[in-house]
Amino acid sequence: MSDSSAARISTIILPADGRQSPVAAGIQRGVRRLFAELGHVTLPEFTLANGRRADLIALAPDGSLTIIEIKSSVADFRADRKWPDYEDFCDRFYFAIPETVPFDILPEDRGLIIADSFGAAVMRESLHHPLAGARRKAVTLRFAHAAASALHALADPDRIADGRL
């Protein structure tokens, strides 16, 4: 491969997926920044084996998995009770909210992150419930496949448009 044909690193701007409000998108950005600072890699809108879609999943250098459920308002929290279905697929579980949402509506036994589009802070640590080895392997493989598929889609957007990815 010649220097002129070598792969180049460039800025990638991902389109909004349209599933989130601007507030939720800002929370996601801030939480992803926090986890990146901790050395974790994250994927948004991660489909679990049970068919549920987690707002955000993080994979730590040690292989531990964290799911973050984004709630942009009190109404958002009250309308969605699917989050207990996510806990069988992670070692830790957090809610991420903006500072305008009162803490007391959230379960006290779950982790809590306050976030905006610039960053995030852990306000309450999550309990640690280690996954069984087989479940960890299955979720990690699903994570790897989703990440590779997303990278492929960036490199070959026509394939996505054709519905072949």
Image: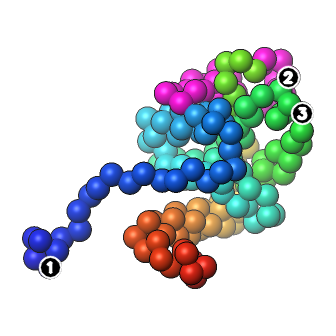
Q: Nearer the viewer, residue 111 or 44?
A: 44
CA neighbours of label 3 inside 10 A, class few (<14), some (14 to 19), many (20+): few
The stretch of residues the image draws in magenta is 102-126
Image quadrant holding the C terminus, namely bottom right
Which residue is drawn at the image coordinates 48% and 53% (left, top)? 14
CA neighbours of label 1 inside 10 A, class few (<14), some (14 to 19), many (20+): few
| Separation of residues labelled 3 and 2 (CA atoms) | 9 Å
Q: Is 127 in the magenta? A: no
Q: Position of residue 3 (x, y in %)?
A: 10, 70
Amino acid type, label 2:
Ile
Secondary structure under badge 2? helix
| Separation of residues labelled 2 and 1 (CA atoms) | 57 Å
Which circle's residue, 1 or 3, is located before the other in the chain? 1
**Residue bearing the label numbered 3:** 78
Q: Quadrant of residue 80?
A: top right
Q: Position of residue 152 (x, y in %)?
A: 46, 71
Front: mark 3 or 2: 3
Q: Is residue 131 above or below residue 93?
A: below
Q: Nearer the viewer, residue 162 or 129?
A: 162
**Residue bearing the label numbered 1:** 1
Q: Position of residue 120 (x, y in %)?
A: 55, 27
Which residue is drawn at the image coordinates 61% and 39% (left, top)? 25
Amino acid type, label 1:
Met
Which residue is drawn at the image coordinates 52% and 70% (left, top)? 149
